[in-house]
Image (cartoon, rainbow, N blue to C red):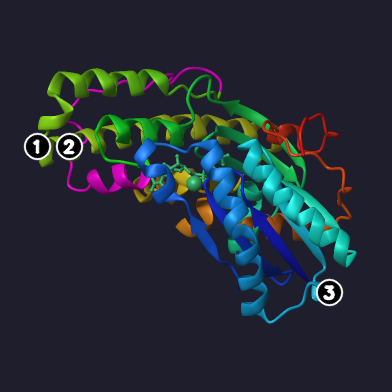
Amino acid sequence: RVVLGIETSCDETAVALVRDDRRVLAAPLVSQIAEHAPYGGVVPELAARAHVERLDLLIAQAMREAQLDFGDLAGVAASAGPGLIGGLIVGLLTGKAIAAVHGLPLIAVNHLEAHALTPRLTDGVAFPYLLLLVSGGHCQLLEVEGVGRYRRLGTTIDDAVGEAFDKVAKMLGLGYPGGPMVEKAAKGGDPARFTLPRPLLGQPGCNFSLSGLKTAMRTLILKLGAQALEPQTLADLCAGFQAAVGDVLVDRTRRAMALLERRHGRLPVLVVAGGVAANRAIGGRLAALAAEAGTSLAVPPPRLCTDNGVMVAWAGIERLALGLVDGLDAPARARWPLDAAAEPALGAGG
Ligand code: ATP
Ligand code: MG
Ligand code: FE
């Protein structure tokens, strides 16, 4: 059984054909980096237009690569939210049209659930597990009990972690998208040269705060002068930022692990998902945390951490197997919290 996955929630137009034995048959993806780079961030109108221009071609390319006809499919899955509403509507309407014409079930996928379930595709992780979701729009710890069953343990009270990476990259003139640039620039840097805050470190609960760290970076960069930074200073700044983010993520995740251990009498498997999970320095810190606690860690390969069609197709496969399909009236939703993924649609648009 093969499911077509469509991802258009942000600035990646991505399509995938995935089989329920976890085999990826095709996964073409076009990133819109060139369109948005001059603006230093994603421009929603440009993103929606670029999705319109490319999506049909990508779907045709995937079908050709896999040598399949639409009639061979078991279902069509499209990201329905959260994300930029224009792009979501493009992807979801395209999915609905294919489903309607070929009489296929439609799965309106929560984009965050697609990130959250990816380690089940790549590593076969079993429920329940502890999920650290670190992406462009989110920074959360969730207990994943099953498909559509998420319990939030903590969330950011201000910025998302990918957003913090992107903003710091912008301050340093490293360009867009920022996360990979900061990681690259941090190579060979001394993380201890600059003193940076670790908001909420050691505090009760599992919430995150990143805006204080971002502001400290801004103050420091203004003082040093972003234009005149020596390569070593740039590396030290990026390494310091990355180390501070790592400390915060490790501290909060350790608390969530302890909480779940108390609740269930055993340590949970730790899963990291979302774009920031592609960061090797942060991945290394979390691997050390898991090893120290005596549990295992699953992180998808980088291309499946950032937005992609494979994760959407896989979420479709998981939902389809449980009979969780959606009507052709399923709405696109700009906001759609993961711990409400199983609730009935509230949203506007679509
Ligand atoms: P969301 O999934 O919350 O809706 P999104 O889809 O925009 O947001 P993702 O595609 O999951 O986010 O991740 C993109 C984010 O990940 C960007 O903020 C990017 O800077 C960050 N990112 C990607 N690679 C790295 C890296 N190597 N190091 C740090 N951050 C990274
Ligand atoms: Mg992106
Ligand atoms: Fe994402």
Q: Quadrant of residue 48?
A: top right
Position of 349 with respect to 157 (left or right) is right
Label 1 – label 3 distance at C-alpha: 58 Å
User: Would residue 175 be seen by someone viewing this image from the given angle?
Assistant: yes
The residue tagged 1 is 230
Amino acid type at mark 1: Glu
Q: Residue at x 78, y 30 (%)?
A: 347
Query: What SS does tag 3 mark?
Result: helix
Q: Quadrant of residue 99?
A: bottom right
Q: Position of residue 147 (x, y in %)?
A: 76, 48
Quadrant containing the C terminus is: top right
The residue tagged 3 is 71
The residue tagged 2 is 234
Q: Are marks 2 and 1 in contact (CB under 8 Å)?
A: yes
Residue nearest the observer in this picture, 343 or 326: 326
Start-end of magenta stretch: 179-205
Q: Residue at x 58, y 59 (%)?
A: 54
Quadrant containing the N terminus is: bottom right
Q: Is 42 placed above or below 54 here?
A: above
Residue nearest the observer in this picture, 263 or 170: 170
Residue nearest the observer in this picture, 152 or 316: 316
